[in-house]
Image (cartoon, rainbow, N blue to C red):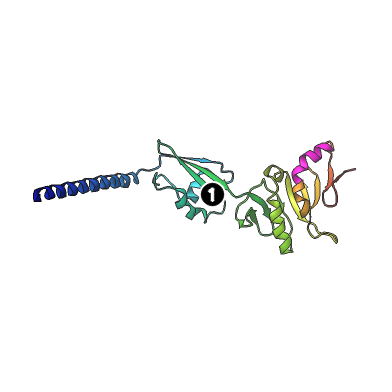
């Protein structure tokens, strides 16, 4: 009976050793795989940053590990980035890393501070000629915050039609603005109706593309130039 116990103990020890060797082998393979580098990067949906700038913001280069590069790790760098809101990674068997980028929207360029204001209200050192320019100061903090909030509701195509924005309050409305459009028209609008500027193209088409002033502040009518 004693010999059988020894045999069983030897079998158990042998099985444990085999298991540990297999586990060690797997760990070794995974460790070696961390040294495999990304062969090619593909960047998608970046509008404001170039591919090179995206990689620089995410601290990625030709020495980056194919396996260790992940969204959780890059969130450290995303928090420090002014324009990148989020990223998604997709790997291929050819060691390619595809990066889907989500950027913050650019709202307007504030001429008073020479900064660009993005959708979360942050001001950054970035210049883009496709966004409107706020040419004068909004001296009311609450109006300014509401202005930023309402600008978020303007779609990008319409935003590109706006050349300049002037804060133009009067005795009735402290949230009144004048928009200078790229086609030569002007639009008076209050912040409560600012989202109606998304209908600008259809409104102008309805007046046969005449030039003049569109009043969206106290109504919805167009006065052509004489």
Could you tell whether 223 is left or right of 88 in the image? right
Magenta residues span 197-206
Quarter-wise, where is residue 113 in the image?
bottom right
- How many neighbours does mark 1 have within 10 angstroms: few (below 14), some (14-19), or many (20 or more)? some
Q: Quadrant of the C terminus?
A: top right
Name the residue furthest front.
1
Name the residue furthest right.
226
x and y percent of residue 50 in the render? 54, 44
**Res. 218 in view:** yes
Quarter-wise, where is residue 161 in the image?
top right
Circle 1 residue: 86
Q: Is residue 213 above or below residue 92?
A: below
Q: Main secondary structure of the magenta part?
A: helix
Element class at badge 1: strand
**Res. 49 in view:** no
The reply to whether the magenta stretch includes residue 203 is yes
Name the foreground residue: 89 vs 137.
89
């Amino acid at each position: 009976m004693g010999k059988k116990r020894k045999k069983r103990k030897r079998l158990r020890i042998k099985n444990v050793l085999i298991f540990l060797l297999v586990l060690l082998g797997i760990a070794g393979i995974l460790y070696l795989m961390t040294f495999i580098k990304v062969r090619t990067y593909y960047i998608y949906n970046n509008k404001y940053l170039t591919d090179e700038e995206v990689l620089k913001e995410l601290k990625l280069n030709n020495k980056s590990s194919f396996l260790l590069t992940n969204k959780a790790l890059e969130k450290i760098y995303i928090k420090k980035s002014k324009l990148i809101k989020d990223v998604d990674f997709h790997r291929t068997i050819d060691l390619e890393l595809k990066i889907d980028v989500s950027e913050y929207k650019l709202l307007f360029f504030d001429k008073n501070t020479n900064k660009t204001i993005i959708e979360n209200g942050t001001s950054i050192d970035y210049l883009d000629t496709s966004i409107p320019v706020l040419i004068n100061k909004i001296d009311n903090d609450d109006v300014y915050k509401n202005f930023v909030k309402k600008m978020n509701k303007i779609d990008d195509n319409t935003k590109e039609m706006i050349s300049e924005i002037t804060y133009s309050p009067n005795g009735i409305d402290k949230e009144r603005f004048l928009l200078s459009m790229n086609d030569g028209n002007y639009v008076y609008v209050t912040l409560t109706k600012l989202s109606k500027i998304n209908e600008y193209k259809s409104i102008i088409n309805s007046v046969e593309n005449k030039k003049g002033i569109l009043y969206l502040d106290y109504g919805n009518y167009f006065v052509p130039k004489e």
